[in-house]
Image (cartoon, rainbow, N blue to C red):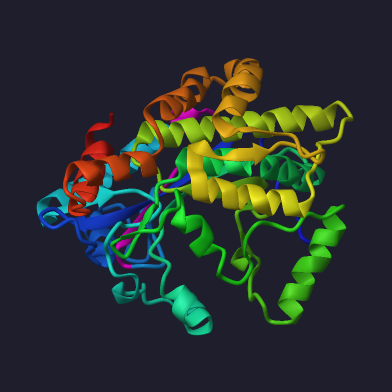
Amino acid sequence: MNIDFAPSARSTLGVEWELALVDRRTGDLVSVAENVLQDLKTHHPELKDDDEHPHVKQELLLNTVELVTGVCTTVEQAKDDLASGLDSVRAVTDPMGVELFCAGSHPFAAPRSQPVTDKERYAKLIDRTQWWGQQMVIYGVHVHVGLDHRDKALPVLDGLVNYFPHFQALSASSPYWGGEDTGYASQRALMFQQLPTAGLPFQFPSWAAYEDYVQDMLTTGVIDVISEIRWDVRPVARLGTIEMRVCDGLATLEEVGAIAALTQCLVEEFSTVLDEGWAIPTMPPWHVQENKWRAARYGLDAIVILDAAGREMLVTDHLREHVLNRLEPVARRLGCSKELADIEGIIQRGAGYQRQRRIAAENEDDLRSVVMDGIQLLRNGY
C-alpha cells in the first residue's frame, strides 16, 4: 500500500494535553466530559451542533478532556493555544465544582469503574482488550513536530527512541495506581504498552517497509485504521509529523512547554543531520527496551544506556552535560530557549512522581492531598 505523507512545514509544532476532571471536594474522578463539551458550545455560539471546540476534544474516558493546539511555529505559541483552551474549559468547570488535574495516572481512583465515551471505536477497543483496556485511566502529553520530507520520518523516529528514557524520566508522574504505590516512577508507561500496537515502535529500514507493516496489520485485522497504531513514537502521515507520545501527564503549562521544546529541538537537530547527509545512530532493541523499563522504574535516578556500545550514564547528568547545552543554538533558532531551559527546572525540583510521594508522606499517605496539590499546580504553577 502507499501511505502519502502530507506536506508539513519543517519543525512546526502541535501539542496535545490530556486532563482529568475531578471533584473539587473529594479529588475523585468525575465523568462529566460530555457535559463540559456540550456546555462549551453555549460559550461559543459560533459552533454548530456537530462541531467540536477547536482546542478541546473528547477522549476515551468520560473523566477526561484533551486540550490541543493548532499548527504552531513556536513553543510560546503552543503554550498560548493551550492556555486559551484551559480558560475555555475552566469557564465551564469552575461553576460545576469540577477541577482539572494532570499526572500520568490518578493516584486512588478505581480504574475499572470509569465510564467510557460512547463511541464505536472506543467500545471496540474495550471489547477486544478486556481487563487491560479497562485499566486505561492514564493521561499523557503528545508533541507533533513537522517534517519537510517523508524519508526523514523513520530516521527521526529512531533518533527520538534514543531519548525515550530522558522524556520518560522527566515526565514520570504515575507512581500510584488504585491507591497503592507501585514502586515505579511511571506506572502509565508499563500499563499503556499492554494494548495491541502500543509501546515501543518497530524500527524500519525504509518507508516502503513501514507501508508493508501497515498493510499486514490491516490485512490481518490487527487494526482498522492507521491511527490505531499507538506506538510511543510514531509517524503521522496525514499531518506530515512525527509524534512523540512517551510522556506521562504533566502538571503545569511550564512543564508541557519544556517537553515540547526538547522535542522540537531534537527533531530539528535530526532534520539538519539528515540534510547534511549523515545518519542518525540507532541502538539495539534490547537496549531500547531496557531503557524504557529503567526510566519507568527509577525516573530521574535511572542510569540509561547511551549507544550500541553499551555506555551508560545517569539520565540527569546526560541531559545537563551533553544534551541541553548542545541544543541551545537550535533552541535560539526556533525561539524556545526559555522553554528548553525549563528542563533544568524539572531536574532541580524533581519530577512529578517525586513530588507526589513527598506530598503523600507529609499528609500521612492521604492520596487526596496528592490530587489537591496537583489541582493547585495546574491552576497556579510552581
Q: Is residue 218 left or right of residue 231?
A: right
Res. 1 in view: no
Q: Which residue is painted at 51% across and 35% down in the image?
A: 260
Across and down, in percent, residue 299 comes to 49, 42
Whether 32 is drawn above or below 11: the answer is below
Whether residue 22 appears in magenta in the rendering, the answer is no
Across and down, in percent, residue 268 comes to 68, 30
Considering depth in this image, is 140 or 89 the residue closer to the camera? 140
For the record, the magenta segment spans 62-78
Total marks drawn?
Answer: 0
Whether residue 66 appears in magenta in the rendering, the answer is yes
Q: Quadrant of the C terminus?
A: top left
Q: Is residue 94 left or right of residue 319?
A: left
Q: Is residue 252 left or right of residue 337?
A: left
Q: Residue furthest right?
A: 277
Q: Which residue is painted at 26% across and 45% down in the image?
A: 88
Considering depth in this image, is 139 or 344 the residue closer to the camera? 344
Res. 200 in view: yes
Q: Which residue is painted at 51% across and 50% down in the image?
A: 297
Q: Specify the quadrant of the image occupied by residue 254.
A: top left
Q: Which residue is painted at 17% across and 49% down in the image?
A: 364
Across and down, in percent, residue 330 comes to 64, 20
Whether 69 is drawn above or below 271: the answer is below
Across and down, in percent, residue 310 comes to 77, 39
Q: Specify the quadrant of the image occupied by residue 145.
A: top right
Considering depth in this image, is 308 or 274 the residue closer to the camera? 308
Q: Specify the quadrant of the image occupied by residue 160.
A: top right
Q: Quadrant of the N terminus?
A: bottom right
